[in-house]
Amino acid sequence: MSEPPDNLYLMDLQLTTAAIEALLLASETPIAPGRLPMLLPEASPETIQRAIVELRTIFSGPSRGIHLVHVADGLQFRTNPAFSGQIRTMFQSKPVRLSRPAMETLAIIAYRQPITRAQIEEIRGVDSSGVVRTLMDHVLVESVGRLDDIGKPWLYGTTRRFLEFFGLENIADLPTLEQNEVDALLQMQVHLDADLDRGEE
Amino acid sequence: MTMTAPKVALKTAPKTATTVAAERIVPPELRLNLAAFTGPMDLLLDLIRKHEIDIFDIPIAIITTEYLAYLDTINTLDLHAGDEWLEMAAMLILIKSRMLLPPDPTAEDDDAGPDPREELVQRILEYQMYKLVAEKLDDRPQLSRDVFAPASRVAEYAKDLGPPPLHEASMDDLMNALRRIIQRQKTKPDWAYEITRERLTLRHVILEISTLLRDSPRITFDTIFEGGEISRHRVVTTFLALLEMTRLKMIRLFQAKLTEDVLYIERAVIDIVEVSQTFEFNE
């Protein structure tokens, strides 16, 4: 009593999907999709691929409490942000925000890395040693090397935890300015150049 | 009214006396602003927004006046205005004075030279851009605040799954381990002024660490400092020894990944004592 190949494939896909679901629940860190073929040697890469797509469809949207997200080059189950209030009540915890100076500094490091402290301070116009240390204590920022310059200053960059913390897939996934925001900044630039040209006449 | 209010406050609730005094000196609308700015750039940006100024035609006199008024407020409250606030004030005054000067008649051509405000404008624009993206980043759902992952629960099982997960130690991990050792020693009076100079060479410390690693393949950072006197000289030499041994691939450094801060030193060669004797170290 042999089953038609289509059914066999469906069985295979269902089992693979279930297996990945189990792995995701048990894993402490995001699972890189590249690791799955090793963990599930009996499933073909195509099946694994389809299973991931399946799971991402299931675990998404407002009617789901658990979402499957792609962070720091891996897959992870996370709660739906809509229910953060209820979870915090359960944990009896208050939301902690990064301070404004910390967010400002973190953004500069994230978009400009690797960057020295002097370069950060040039943009912010304010001493940033304390803020950088706080960000390092939170493992959002780390020293990534030294600049080959006078005094060999440390260069700073963001960590893997930074990606996990903000739910980013990789650094290229950082939020960008909207087109109209870019336009506004560019407009200012053009305006400035025109002003300078007029000055030279 | 304003004269009697502090007296009453003193009698009924002494704790609030200073608060009342502060209220008397500083109008409330200024007090609110104090912690609101992250730095001079932030204040400048706010002044420009408040006055709906065209950023390319900043009335430098007005801005400078308001900026200095703000600095005065800080000083009134006896808060420490950092160097950077004064630096920016100096820059504004410099730009203001340059604007007042007629164009240099000895200049080679009729070029009026760059607008003295140009650099400031560029800096404000750049700063504004980072402020925008910082807000966007902050709006994202953040882990353990807006979204939760099953991570913390797994930590409970970690003990049964073997030793705590380790990751290759970074320079920061090594520095932190050293800092912890130094922190413990700081209270000793000998720490600041070292009287006896220990005769301790790099080779000696490397041999010591190698001997420890011969007996057990993985030791904690603290093991190195057990027993003996911990002097500054020893801490520095140990630091150099660990760097040198890592460079020569004799050892590998690992940091415990869970919150307990433990730096592990693992031998990377089996006959580590023999190996340590064959190298030439730069003393």
Image: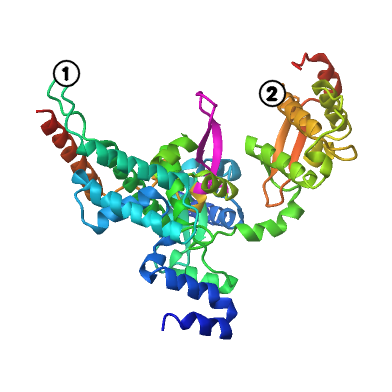
Element class at badge 1: loop
User: Disc 2: which chain?
Assistant: B
The quarter holding residue B275 reads: top right
The quarter holding residue A126 reads: top left
Query: Would you say B148 lies left or right of B95 here?
Result: right
| Disc 1: CA contacts within 10 A as few (<14), some (14-19) or many (>=20) | few
Q: Which mark is residue B108?
A: 1
Name the residue: 69% across, 46% down.
B165
Query: Would you say A50 lies left or right of A200 here?
Result: right
Q: Is residue B238 visible?
A: yes
Tags 2 and 1 on a common chain: yes
User: Disc 1: which chain?
Assistant: B
Q: Which mark is residue A149?
A: none
Residues in magenta? A139-162
Q: Is residue B257 above or below residue B157?
A: above
Q: Quadrant of the N terminus of chain B?
A: bottom left
Q: Which one is in front, B271 or B36?
A: B36
Q: Which one is in front, A191 or B110?
A: B110
Q: Quadrant of the C terminus of chain B?
A: top right
The reply to whether the C-beta atoms of the residues labelled 2 and 1 are less than 8 Å apart is: no
Q: Is residue A57 visible?
A: no
Residue A20 image point, x, y percent: 54, 52
